[in-house]
Amino acid sequence: MSESSEAAPVPRPQRPAAGGRLRIGDDWNAITIIALSQDNPLKAVAELVENSIDAGARRITITRGRERGEHYLEVTDDGRGVPRDAEGRPDFRYVATHICDSLKRRLKAEGARGIQGEYGIGLLSFWTVGEELAMSSGGADGHVYEMRMRKHDPGYSVARLRALLAEPGTRVKIRPLLPGVRQLSGEKIQRYLASELRERIRQSGAAVRVLDRQARKELPVEPRQFAGELLHHLPAPGPAPGEIYVELYLAAPDAANEVGLYRSGTRILASIAELEAFSRPPWTEGSLQGMIDAPFLNLTPATRTGVIHDGALEALASALVPVEARLLELIEERRRAEEERSSRDTLRAIQRAFREALLTLPAEDYDWFEVSARRRAAAGNGEEPPAGDEAAGGIEISGEPQPAQRQFFEFAGPLHSVRIAPAACTVAVGGERRLRALARDASRRHVSEGIEYAWRIVEGGGALDNPAAEYVAYRAPEEPALVRIAVTARQGETACEAEALVTVTDSLLPESRSREAAGHGLPGYTLEHAPGKLWRSRLDAETNVIVVNSGHRDYVFASRAKTLKLRYLVRLYAKEMVRRNFPGLRGEELLDRLIELSLYTEEHLR
């Protein structure tokens, strides 16, 4: 066959490229997915309240109750009601057949303001609250019409009720409530709405209340008030697609402190730090409360509790950069001020504890305070030690001189307590020890007038000289013993008692320590961050300051709680005090002194 006789190939027709518009294959399945996407029943209640605010309501009531054995939740308002159709009836048909086609979105496009919804799915969230929704509103003919929808039912029904329209507005009733929702108390609904709709309620001026018929309570929903110091002079946010409203408060550090993210007055996130773009200081410091409102953000349509991570969110993050820089400065300034105040408070607490301990312990054994010098001076002049808290036991902290003349508030009140100084001491067999009864008022001031004393030996041997005086001399027996001595102080009809323990021993340790620490007063303390170093503290004798290693693992462990840190510092003080006052004692004796001083000091920590 010749070449020309071969059949020419027939060209295949080219198929047009496939394409088209997306469509929902199963409408009811899509509606079910949308209805179940809202996982927070409180958010569903907030959606209903927002619908009322959007309808111009001035009074909104959320009622929680029980009727005919069924729990229900009802939201009523005095707003404009459901928009009416051409016949003047509430257009429930449009509401039920235009899911995801919100009338509010069209109103926004036409320039309407103060409207929040835009997805047309708010009513479907009743699936997370109860089994059936009944929505009623008035028509132009004066009658009330009601639409009913049931969970998992694709149908809806509209009927005219026999009742005449008593007042304008809308009523939405959900019943019976789901088992988990029945536990939502009126207080919980009130607190949630106060935070979730803070700005919507405040801007609209609507009066919102929760009527809890089961608990018989009426709870007004007031916009949540933030705690802390309002920050007035923050820098303005940078350029953004819309206005950014910033209201922030500087509060004491607490993990519960959060800055909420809002859009047009409705909270969309409890904490802005939940977003990766803001998961950094200052938002994660726990030192801020308040809100940031950005109306230009785009929400996730289903739950409306999240933000789409798009250019609008990036613009917000960029705009807040100058605000963040200033917030970090303010938080650091507050942290430094708090540390300084905490150090002063801690030092005062340590001073109080040591003052009380030295009233209990033999003062001559611990010379970090100016104890012996003042007592010897008073005795040499034939005077008693001055009255007052610090001077009651002859104690004065270095650098804290007493005023020459007492003020009105320094005069003692009536008798409140009494104690013995020292309340624990050691005496050699056959030796003598002087004891004093310290009468005090409720403010721990020394009471010196109108007091009668009665001393007695409760247990053990020995004798007391002049048992009716403020000062007594105790003479120890010739055998070792543990002696309990008591005193009763009486002022009119008020009587107080105290006890002291005296150890009578035949093996009293010899004096082996130097007096170079006397007169120095209780030192202050400072922190030095030296991680990896083994020393916990050291005394700088020249400046009379205890240097504490804040990088030591023990300090880090103790800093978890204020009381634990205070006890740790007191033990460091006790260690340095014992080392300073008893340089010649053996290790075992030093440990005994450390236990003694720590025991009586920690008793008075607060």
Image: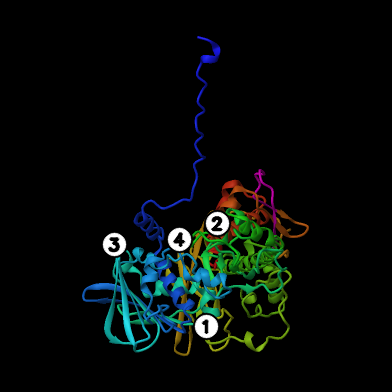
Is 383 drawn above or below residue 2 in the view shown?
Answer: below
> Residue shown at 42%/78% (left/top)?
83
Given the image, on which type of amino acid does mark 3 rest? Asp
Q: Which residues are magenta?
A: 523-538
Which residue in the structure is indicated by mark 3? 153
Judge the density around disc 1: few (<14), some (14-19), many (≥20) Cα neighbours within 10 Å.
some
Q: The C terminus is located in which quarter? A: bottom right
Which-is-in-front pick, marks 2 and 3?
3
SS at badge 4? loop
- Compare marks 4 and 2 and give the one earlier in the sequence: 4
Which residue in the structure is indicated by mark 1? 205
- Compare marks 3 and 4 and give the one earlier in the sequence: 3
The answer to the question of whether label 4 and label 2 lie on touching residues, with beta carbons closer than 8 A, is: no
Does 544 appear in magenta?
A: no
Does 536 appear in magenta?
A: yes
Given the image, on which type of amino acid does mark 2 rest? Ile
Which-is-in-front pick, marks 3 and 4?
3
SS at badge 1? loop
Q: CA distance from mark 3 to mark 4?
A: 21 Å
Which residue in the structure is indicated by mark 4? 303
Given the image, on which type of amino acid does mark 1 rest? Gly
